[in-house]
Amino acid sequence: MATYKNVNYLEKSSSEAFDQDHGPGATAPFAGIYRCMGCHREIGIASKHVLPPQGHHAHTQAQGSIRWRLIVYADHDPK
Ligand SMILES: [Zn+2]
């Protein structure tokens, strides 16, 4: 699970971007931390980079396919 120490660096959001799953090899729409919804592995990725492919890690049958979901958005361009 993603962790943090200082709450001042994170902000709660209700954006639908956090509800969408992305397939292996898809382009990450946002920079940040993505979680595999099958096994809960997490990765960090830059905006517009390609999410890890299907063979990135192994799943059991019960874990299903790799589905990446944005769990923490990284702001590349703070105002
Ligand atoms: Zn996984």
Image: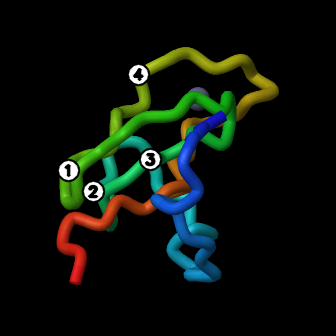
Q: Which mark is residue 27?
A: 2
Is 66 displayed left or right of 61 in the figure?
left
Between marks 2 and 3 in the image, the one whose residue lies nearer the viewer: 3
Q: Quadrant of ligand 1?
A: top right
Q: Which mark is residue 33?
A: 3
- Mark 3 / mark 1, whichever is N-terminal: 3
* Cβ–Cβ under 8 Å for marks 2 and 1: yes
Ligand 1 within 8 Å, label 4 CB: no
**39 vs 35: above or below:** above
Q: Nearer the viewer, residue 60 or 49?
A: 49
Q: Which residue is mark 4?
A: 55
**17 vs 49: above or below:** below
Between marks 3 and 4 in the image, the one whose residue lies nearer the viewer: 3
Inter-mark Cα distance, 4 to 1: 17 Å
Between marks 3 and 1 in the image, the one whose residue lies nearer the viewer: 3
Quarter of the picture holding the N terminus: top right
Inter-mark Cα distance, 4 to 2: 16 Å
- Give the amino acid at mark 4: Gly
Q: Which mark is residue 14?
A: none
Inter-mark Cα distance, 3 to 4: 19 Å
Residue 75 appears in which quarter of the rendering?
bottom left
* Cβ–Cβ under 8 Å for marks 4 and 2: no
Element assignment for label 1:
loop
Quarter of the picture holding the C terminus: bottom left
Q: Nearer the viewer, residue 42 or 68?
A: 42
- Give the amino acid at mark 2: Thr
Is disc 1 surrounded by few (<14), some (14 to 19) or many (20+) residues within 10 Å?
A: some
Between marks 4 and 1 in the image, the one whose residue lies nearer the viewer: 1
Between marks 4 and 2 in the image, the one whose residue lies nearer the viewer: 2
- Give the amino acid at mark 1: His
